């Protein structure tokens, strides 16, 4: 006789249950099952909602959600550049970006060497392809965040990548200067590059103090004459501004700093002395031209100058100071950037975090902070991004408190504890004895 037959005999030997009691028990069991399903669905919905909030900033990278004008220009800038679980390579068409971030060492592992990263307006970033493990060949970013210029390989070419359309314009003959004999097309290291306001032209540093001008529209380039100074930026679509003169590295030098304006061929249009700059040493990072082209900001450092650290704005028309000297512990080598009427300066970072501040109105105001864990150094801004709203700060804004960089992990740990508690309660629950 099988076990099934024995159980059937046992059931038949028992008296029939009370129909009312059976109905009540069935209803009670149904209620408990419905309650358990509701609890499980509620927990699942909470977890799904949490992942929707947490994962976009940590892993998922949708295409250009913070771009405007048909995704052709960046809108806004990151208030926080936080830790990211998964950093992917830059796609062909990510849309306009807000900035380029130098020398991130994600998680301090061997497969994440120092390099350059594109940063979206909400702080999400992608990895730029490496050029022979060098980070001193600075990429360039247009004002609208649409065009990215960089050296593709040590042997060239230099490429301007349209982040909206995915198109690339190549410039053959521009190469890594390392170990090569002096010739045209050697890309200068540790120096900023400047797109023209409309993005048509790109002004690149070249080796041995020369510079190159790239025409993005037709894919051609040429070198400009030597001895004009150090590039500071564009004063309009066809005017270049150079800084020259100033201190030569000796503290006793009394030569004033001058701003030279040339046309696109290098012919001088104007050359004015900047008031009160005698002996001030101008590094390749010192000058920055305003978006309207009417002013130039000069950032001084103590590297080769007796002048205190800080920044002063000057009129390009006559060289007169437009602002009082503002003491700022500027981070070198990093570029200052103009937004609409404001000067944004990278400040010496505490704990290896980038802190960018607006110093135009006196007391500095923090614009962007970066997590110390990612080892950020410098930012190359799309100037238009700084004109837009701050994004990605959430409830913590620009706070640098340690816990603010780990909020996703803290939140997920809390949810995991809640889920574990709910499941434990459901498993231990027993029906009442009737």
Image: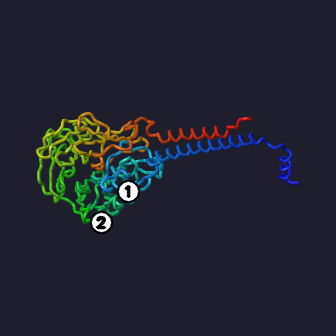
Q: Going by the picture, which residue comes out furthest to the top?
A: 363
Q: Identify the residue shown where x is 16% and y is 42%.
A: 314
Q: Position of residue 159 (x, y in %)?
A: 32, 61
Relative vertical location of residue 334 with respect to residue 175 in this rendering, above or below = above
Which quadrant: the C terminus?
top right
Q: Position of residue 209 (x, y in %)?
A: 23, 54
Quadrant hosting residue 401: top left
Circle 2: element type: loop
Which residue is labeled 1 in the image? Answer: 94
Relative vertical location of residue 307 with respect to residue 124 in this rendering, above or below = above
Task: Confirm whether residue 116 shows in the render.
Answer: no
Closer to the chain start, of discs 2 and 1, is 1
Quadrant hosting residue 281: top left
Q: Identify the residue shown where x is 74% and y is 40%.
A: 20
Q: Going by the picture, which residue comes out furthest to the right?
A: 1
Task: Confirm whether residue 409 shows in the render.
Answer: yes
Circle 1: element type: loop
Which residue is labeled 2 in the image? Answer: 172
Q: Which mark is residue 42?
A: none
Mark 2 Cα-neighbour bin, 10 Å: few <14, some 14–19, many ≥20 = some
**Left or right of residue 260, residue 115 in this image:** right
Residue situated in front as seen by the camera: 334 or 283: 334
**Left or right of residue 372, residue 388 in this image:** left
Mark 1 Cα-neighbour bin, 10 Å: few <14, some 14–19, many ≥20 = many
């Amino acid at each position: 006789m099988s076990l099934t037959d024995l159980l059937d005999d046992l059931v038949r030997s028992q008296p029939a249950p009370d129909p009312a009691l059976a109905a009540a028990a069935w209803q009670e069991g149904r209620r408990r099952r419905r309650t358990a399903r509701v609890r499980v669905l509620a927990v699942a919905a909470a977890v799904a909602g949490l992942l929707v909030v947490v994962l976009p900033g940590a892993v998922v990278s949708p295409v250009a959600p913070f771009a405007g004008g048909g995704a052709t220009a960046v809108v806004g800038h990151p208030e926080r550049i936080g830790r990211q679980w998964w950093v992917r390579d830059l796609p062909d068409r990510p849309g306009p970006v807000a900035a380029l971030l130098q020398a991130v060492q994600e998680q301090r592992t061997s497969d994440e060497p120092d390099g350059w990263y594109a940063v979206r307006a909400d702080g999400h970033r992608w990895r730029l392809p490496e050029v022979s493990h060098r980070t001193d060949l600075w990429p360039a970013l247009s004002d609208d965040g649409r065009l990215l210029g960089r050296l593709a390989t040590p042997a060239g070419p230099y490429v301007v990548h349209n982040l909206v359309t995915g198109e690339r314009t190549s410039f053959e003959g521009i190469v890594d200067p390392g170990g090569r004999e002096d010739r045209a097309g050697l890309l200068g290291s540790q120096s900023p590059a400047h797109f023209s306001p409309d993005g048509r032209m790109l002004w690149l540093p070249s080796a041995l103090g020369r510079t190159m001008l790239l025409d993005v529209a037709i894919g051609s380039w040429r070198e400009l004459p030597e001895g004009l100074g150090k590039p500071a930026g564009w004063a309009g679509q066809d005017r270049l501004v150079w800084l020259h003169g100033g201190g030569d590295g000796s503290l006793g030098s009394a030569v004033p700093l001058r701003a030279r304006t040339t046309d696109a061929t290098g012919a001088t249009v104007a050359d004015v002395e900047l008031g009160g700059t005698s002996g001030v040493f101008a590094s390749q990072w010192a000058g920055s031209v305003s978006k309207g082209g009417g002013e130039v900001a000069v950032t001084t450092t103590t590297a080769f100058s007796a002048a205190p650290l800080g920044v002063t704005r000057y009129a390009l028309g006559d060289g007169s100071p437009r602002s009082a000297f503002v003491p700022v512990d500027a981070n070198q080598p990093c570029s200052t950037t103009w937004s609409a009427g404001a000067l944004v300066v990278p400040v010496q970072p505490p704990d290896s975090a980038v802190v960018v501040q607006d110093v135009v109105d006196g007391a500095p105001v923090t614009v962007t902070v970066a997590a110390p864990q990612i080892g950020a150094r410098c930012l190359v801004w799309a100037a238009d991004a700084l004109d837009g709203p701050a994004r990605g700060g959430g409830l913590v804004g620009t706070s640098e408190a340690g816990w603010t960089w780990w909020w996703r992990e803290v939140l997920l740990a809390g949810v995991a504890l809640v889920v574990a508690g709910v499941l434990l309660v459901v498993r231990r629950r027993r029906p009442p004895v009737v």
